[in-house]
Structures are given as C-alpha cells and as structure tokens.
Amino acid sequence: MRHTLSVLVENNPGVLARVAGLFSRRGYNIDSLAVGRTDNPAISRMTIVVEGDERVLEQVIKQLRKLIEVIKVSDISREEHVDRELVLIKVSAEPEKRGEIMQIADIFRARIVDLGRRTMILECTGNEGKIRAFEESLRPYGIKELVRTGKIAMLRGSRYTNINGTREDE
Amino acid sequence: MKKSGAQIFVDCLKEQGVDTIFGYPGGAVLPIYDALYESDIRHILTRHEQGAAHAADGYARATGRPGVCLATSGPGATNLVTGIANAYMDSVPLVAFTGQVVTSQLGRDSFQEADITGITMPITKHNYIVKDVRDLARVIREAFYIATTGRPGPVLVDIPRDVSGAQIEYQDPGPVNLPGYRVATEPRPEDLARAVELIARAERPVIYAGGGVVNSGAHLELRRFAEMLLAPVATTLMGLGAFPGDHPLSLGMLGMHGSKYANYAVCECDLLIAVGVRFDDRVTGKLESFARQARIIHIDIDPAEIGKNVRVDVALVGDARRVLSLLIERLEARLPGAWQEKIATWKKEYPLTYEENGRLKPQKVIREIYYATQGQARITTDVGQHQMWTAHYYTFTRPRTFISSGGLGTMGFGLPAAIGVQVACPDETVFDIAGDGSIQMNIQELATAVHYNLPIKVAIMNNGYLGMVRQWQEFFYNRRYAYSELVNPDFVKLAEAYGAVGMRVEKPAEIAPALQEALATPKPVVIDFIIEREENVMPFVPPGQPLNCMLG
C-alpha cells in the first residue's frame, strides 16, 4: 500500500539528509520525494510517497516526528486530495511523425516546450496514472530522455495542513 | 558586551550547571581550551577521546545530569563516535562538543577534517554544526534541552575554529523555541481507563521494567505499583536497580541470560506491564512466542517505541513516573493468590546457581564484591560474560548503581565509565568489573584514574578468552575457538606501570582479603582474578528461541 506524506520541515541545510538517512537506515522504501520551500521561507514541505503496510507507515510517521527539524507529518492519502507529478519527455520526432505526437499531446493536455530538428520535448502534468499512460503512448516513437518530479499533493476543499496541524478555515 | 565564541561556550556550559567536562585537546578546539583554562569548570583529560565520551556517559548515568565531552576535529571527533552511539542506544543525556576546521576550509578535505555531523546523524538525537558565532548560544541551549528532555539522548555540537575564535557583541538568544520538538507528557484518559480495566481483570500480571524507569526517576512509584498489584517485576539489564533486587517481588533479569523464573513468569503471565522498555531482541527471544498468553500494556515516553517490535493492547505514552502515579491513584491493592505461589515455587525450584569446585568461580568473586561493598557500590562493567555474571550475582537495590553498556554492547566501556562515575560520586565506592578482553580496549584510562587520583577498583575476570565469544563457539560452533583465546599482559605489572596498585587472586580463599585490601587502598587498584577458564553464563536462551527454551 502506498501513502503520501506531507511533511513540514525547518528549511535548514541537512534536513533532507536526516530524512533520507532515516528512511534508508530503518529500511523504509521511498517511492518518490519532492521538496520545496513553502510560502514561509523558513519552512519547507516534503511530499514523500512511501510503500508499506499500516505498521510500517505508523513507524515511518513516528520516526519522522522524532526528528527535531520535522514540524508536522500528515498522511494526506487518507483524505480527499489532489496530487500531481510533472514529466518532461524528449521523444524522437521525425517531421512525418510530428503530427501524431502533437495529437497525443493534445489528448493528454501536454505542452510542447522544445522542438529540435529530430526531437521534441513534451511537458505533462497529472496524477501518476496519467503520466504513466502518457509515457506509454510516446514509447513507440522512441523516448530519448525522461525526467519526472516526485509527487506533490494537497488536501481538497478548505482543509489544509500547516505548521499548526490540519485545519479548516472558518 | 563583547564575547568570543569560546567565552560564550564556557558561559553557556555554566548556565547549564555543567561542573565537569571530559575531553582531549587538539588544534581545532584550542580557542575553547584557552577559555576553559581560566574557567572554574573542571576538565578531566582522558587518554583517548572514546574514554572521554564513555566517562561523560558514566557521569550522566550516575547522576541523571547531562554528561559533557569535548574533542578536536577529525580523528578526535571520530574517536567519540562509539561513545556517542553507546549513549544513543541506552538513552543517555550526553552533549558532545567537537572542534571543526575553519568554515572557509569546510568541505575541502582539510587537515583533520571529518564530517562529524554527517557521521553522527544516525546515532544522535540531534546534532548541529555552528557556522555563525551568533547562533552558538542558542544552539548550546537547544543541545542541552534536547539531550535531557523526553527520551534522553546524545546531541553533538560541531564548532569550527573560527567560530569559537570569533568576537561578537553578545546578545542573549532567549529561551529555547523548537517548533518541531514535542515531549509527550500525559497519556490519553481513554487509554488510562483501558489499562486500569486490563489490570483489574488480570490474574497473572508481570511487570517488565527497563532503563526508562531509571531515566524518569520512577523507581519508588514502580515499587509502590508492584506492591499494590503483588505483581512480580522482571527488569532488563538497563533496569537493574530500578526495582530492589532483594525485594520478594523481584524476578531479577529476564531475557537471553535472564533467570528461569523471570522467563517462565513472562511466558505464563496473562498481563505484561512494560515500563520504559523497548522489547529488545535480547529480552524477547523469538518474538512470536514472547508473552504469548498476555495482554500487553506499554508505558513509554517515546511514541515511536509503541508497536515497534511487539503489538501492544494499550499504549500509555508519557513519563513513566507520571503514568505510574496515575495508575496507582486508580488501582486497588490486591491479595496474594495462586500466581504469587507459582512464582515462589519457580524461584525455589530454579534458583541462579553455579557449581563450587574449589577453583576460582567468577560468580563467587562477584558475590564477594557484593558482600565487601555491602551492596552499596556503584558498579560499571564492560560487555560479555562478566557483565552477565555481575547482573546475576551483584544484587542491585538502587537506581543508577549498575552502569553498563546495554544496547550497543561496547567492550571497553567499563573503565572510562567508572572514571566518570567516580568524578560524579567522589565519596562512593566505584568498581569496574571487567573482562580480560574488554579491559584492554580502553586500558589507557588507567593513566587518567591515576592522574586524578580516582580510587576506582578494577576487578578483571581473567579467563584468557573472549569469554562470551568462546561460550557461543562452545555451544554453536562445535568448540572451535576461532581467535577467541587471548595472550594477555601481566595486569599486575601493567597496573603498577601506570602508577596504580596491582593485585592477583587465584584461589577462592584469597578473594575476600584481597577485596578488603583494595577497598582500604585510597588509589586506583586493579585485581586480576584468574577465574575458571571455561565457565559459562547460565541460564542461556539460544538466539532466536522462545524464552522458555533455556539451556543450563
């Protein structure tokens, strides 16, 4: 079972190493990890997708909470949420194939961000399933390079997680 | 007011009530040493940085106050590593300070540079590198706060030489503010109610008590709680002394080398009340068979310990002393019944024993140390057979009197730890019970004991083997004693060379007189006890077996 954890951390050097080290030494599997600072420059948010049963997940959350620089850990996959990944794919695009590729891009609402003599770069955002389908659709044309971000996620509705916990306005 | 980084360091230590630090100077800590030189903080110069870390650890275990050690960058810092890991595994409040190369040279593989914050990340509760002298006071306050609150543990602060040497206009950073650091205080009322209900229903309760009881100072509450429930108490190695070993409800130690009656009681209990413990593999044996008939209540201050190794029925997260007080308020005293009788029968049937055959038995040596010190000494140990014999045959009745490396199992801990204990408790008798293998891992600290005239007594259980290794080889490797036999120095001469007193005991009749003489000698004394070579620690649960499958 995969879980998406939203982790607020102090924006200090070394905090990523602490989190990554915790996962590796306790044998937890990270599926993906995305880090960026929040609207408060002193605080960063890590979105960590972790694979494991309830027991592993409980340990991961508790161990993360023990890290001094970790301010807040929430398992947002337990609630209604939106999640997104972004992928850049450089695909072979001989002139005669470009039309087909552009149609696929249209279907996935992907954008063409670079056009070379024999290649194109496509940018697509979406959840994991969509990204996977997009990748599969382009594979027959010859994927030269693929770069994807980790997943980022946010609760739906007026609920949000901030340093004071998960809450709702008004 | 203008202050140097080193002056801030000294002032912050004094503000924390630090009276003693254990350390070893070197290039990157010279500004700090220079400031210490004129301060009233006592500095104990060990002969190896590992000794400084273990001495600070021993000081902390004996007093409950944070131990402080100081080393230079690079090798000085890496030599602390074992000591820090040791304190981490046993939840000891230790604050380790290291010098570091100047900030402009960081990350360039400079002379005596080691990334000690990177190295110690998995073995500290938290660590810091201070790159700006304006952060130094705040970091030191946080370090002591983190080390001593909640579940205690080591914190390392790495200070580059230009930071300790810098001058600034000092501004007080104010009180500690750590938004991500929370310490559990009160268990949830519904969990408390459920625990009370389980306790009331239990017919065969057993208390399993560990180092958390010592750390929280809950020994009186534990005793009260056990006496109310008439529940027998088995302690872990770390919990020895948390419950009086001579109390009728005491089961002694449980686990791999636990007493038979402790292990039987855990196997047959219907309620296990675990207090300040972490269900270590040396305690549980085969996990699936551990306390199989029992509901489990787990009291611990660290939420991450709940359910880590064993599923529990009720978790009471909080300080052991507070949680036990809350339970005591809600419970009624019980009368003895069939369970107490059964325990008494087991205790009679399966006492801890050894065979007396006229040769020098380590168990007898330790029992004699117990008698000679009226059970009132502070005992440190190394790791191995002698450690287990000490756990079995010295009856500990007070917390913080048995000081031993539990989780990490660090050979070489005993002597430097004894130095820290003796510095902390100058008027008490301190014995280091060691093995002939272990003592040689930090034997250089005899020089420290002599230098500061610390009258530590070192009792070496000398069997010419790495005894515990040999024992495992005897049982599991068909008596193939691969590289576990030792050729030892003459420990008497060695002690004398260091300026200590050396003695040797080879016959049972010599034990008591030698101990009397050692205790009357106001100097460090080493007694080389030439014990029966192939004596084993019994009983013995083979690794991976259930607790009721005991050899011996």
Image (tube, coloured by chain):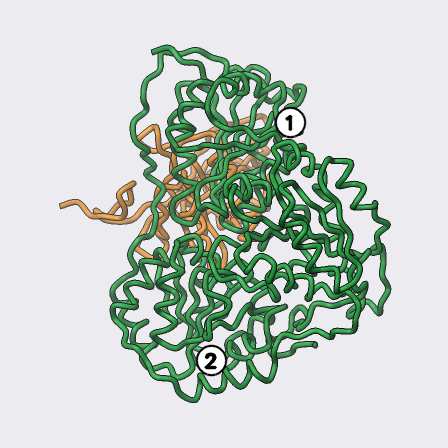
Chain colours: A orange, B green
Residue A96 x %, y %: 57, 35
Q: Is residue A148 left or right of residue B518?
A: left
Mark 2 lies on residue: B269
* Number of dots carrying numbers: 2
Residue A117 x %, y %: 58, 26
* Residue A20 shows up from this direction: no
Q: Which mark, residue B252? A: none
Q: Is residue B248 left or right of residue B260?
A: left
**Measuring 56% from the left and 24% from the top, which residue is drawn there?**
B99
Element under disc 1: loop
Classify A118 as above or below B478. Answer: above
Towards the viewer: A86 or B406: B406
Tell me which amino acid carries mark 1.
Gly
Of the two numbered discs 2 and 1 in the rendering, the one whose residue sits closer to the viewer:
2
Mark 1 lies on residue: B74
Tell me which amino acid carries mark 2.
Cys
Rendering quarter of residue A35: top left
* Residue B262 shows up from this direction: yes
**Measuring 35% from the left and 33% from the top, which residue is drawn there?**
A43
Towards the viewer: B384 or A6: B384
Question: Which mark is first along the chain, 1 or 2?
Answer: 1
**Measuring 33% from the left and 33% from the top, which residue is drawn there?**
B176
Q: Is residue A141 left or right of residue B354?
A: left
Q: Is residue B374 left or right of residue B136?
A: right
The numbered mark 1 sits on a residue in which chain? Answer: B
Element under disc 2: loop
**Measuring 50% from the left and 83% from the top, which residue is drawn there?**
B344
